[in-house]
Amino acid sequence: MDELQKIDILSLDREELAAEITAMGEKAFRAKQIYDWLHVKKISDFSQMSNISAQFREELSKKFCLKQLIIKKKLVSAIDNTVKYLYGLPDGEAVETVLMEYKHGNSLCISTQVGCRMGCRFCASTIAGFVRHLLPSEMLLQIYETERDSGRHVDSIVLMGIGEPLDNYDNVLKFLSLLNSEGDGMSLRHISLSTCGVVNRIYDLAELKTGLTLSISLHAATDERRSEIMPINRKFHLDELMKACRYYFEQTGRRISFEYSLIEGVNDTEQSAQELINLLGGFNCHVNLIPINEIRERDFRKSRSVERFRKRLCDAGLNATVRRTLGADINAACGQLRRDGGLNNADNKQTTGGEL
Ligand code: SAH
């Protein structure tokens, strides 16, 4: 059978795996052992399951596929240990994953889709459009493969790579539950999900009352300006988005983080700061200011007023910080590495301190 037509074993939760294994005539404890090999020991081949008989391993490999990612490109920062991976997927597509080091541990930024259909004007991930959703296994493997390759333990996850996680809602939720239930299960408090503002899904997520941190990519505080740079705003206006954010906070008690990428002359003026203060004033939240990453396909420029903007917000009582730039020497805007990788057909590992 074609590998890709077999059951994707890494995307099965404990119950689903147990049902498959017992249907093959094995006892339920086998499923536990197999789950442990897959999600705790994180093996990459059925042959490594040493407490499973060779005959049953053979049966497993006929029925299931154990997906793997291939490192197509790897960039290591000479400044701060940031590592960017371009991972090849089983069907030949590719996504980006970034490993960052903070005082509190290692954080991994993972992708949730190949491409994106949200169309944000400043974002490289969306330029070539949407290709497909990532499977739960393909999100997990970004963690497993990065831990294997780097020898570093991933302590927290941000869903902030390529794609809109709430546009791949079911697979993302399955991924989170797998992550949460594996042997040394990661608490959802160590996971942040970033969205451009898919309002109906924010309500769905709120109902689950998890400890997940929600980040909203805001980037503008009036409908007119936001709709110009983020098409999602034409579907869900700011008042609806803010209502959903308040509801999320009420239901979960988790403070929302608003991402605001500063673009010279577009959203970094005194007036823009005032609009942001008007929108968020009085709401218990955090504002993350990010100097925009310039991408060559668009003519947005990095703001020169980041500090002044931050001070203006703080003076008005907002909790605003400027995101620390990591991996400045391997600085590729979100989705840029995949585009370059595709164009150059790069299949080599690289260590570089220079430009992409
Ligand atoms: N689709 C999700 C998550 C992926 S994008 C979302 O929109 O939140 C992750 C973050 O990077 C978002 O805040 C997005 O707006 C931001 N981003 C995209 N392109 C960027 C760029 N060129 N410079 C700075 N931030 C960018």
Image (cartoon, rainbow, N blue to C red):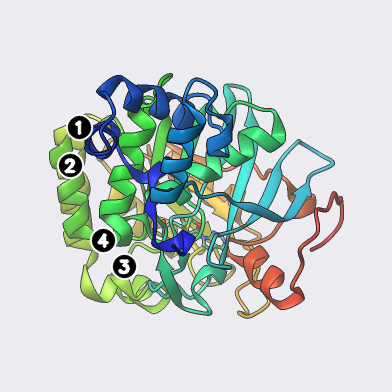
Marked residue nearer the N-terminal end (4 or 2)? 4
Q: Position of residue 25 (x, y in %)?
A: 25, 33
Q: Amino acid at mark 3?
A: Thr
> Is the C-beta separation of discs 4 and 3 under 8 Å?
no
Q: Which residue is mark 4?
A: 198
Residue toward you, 232 or 116: 116
Q: CA distance from mark 1 to mark 2?
A: 7 Å
Q: Is any atom of residue 188 visible in this view? A: no
Q: CA distance from mark 1 to mark 4?
A: 18 Å
Q: Which residue is mark 3?
A: 222
Q: Label 2 CB, ligand 1: below 8 Å?
A: no
Marked residue nearer the N-terminal end (1 or 2)? 2
Q: Residues within 10 Å of mark 1 (few under 14, many from 20)?
A: some
Taking the spot 51% from the left edge, 54% from the top edge, the residue there is 161
Residue toward you, 140 or 338: 140
Q: Amino acid at mark 4?
A: Val
Task: Identify whether 269 is placed above or below 76.
Answer: below
Circle count? 4
Q: Label 1 CB, ligand 1: below 8 Å?
A: no
Marked residue nearer the N-terminal end (4 or 3)? 4
- Name the mark on residue 206: 2
> Which residue of the protein is positioned furthest toward the front in this rendering?
55
Task: Identify whether 149 is placed above or below 129.
Answer: above
At mark 2, the secondary structure is helix
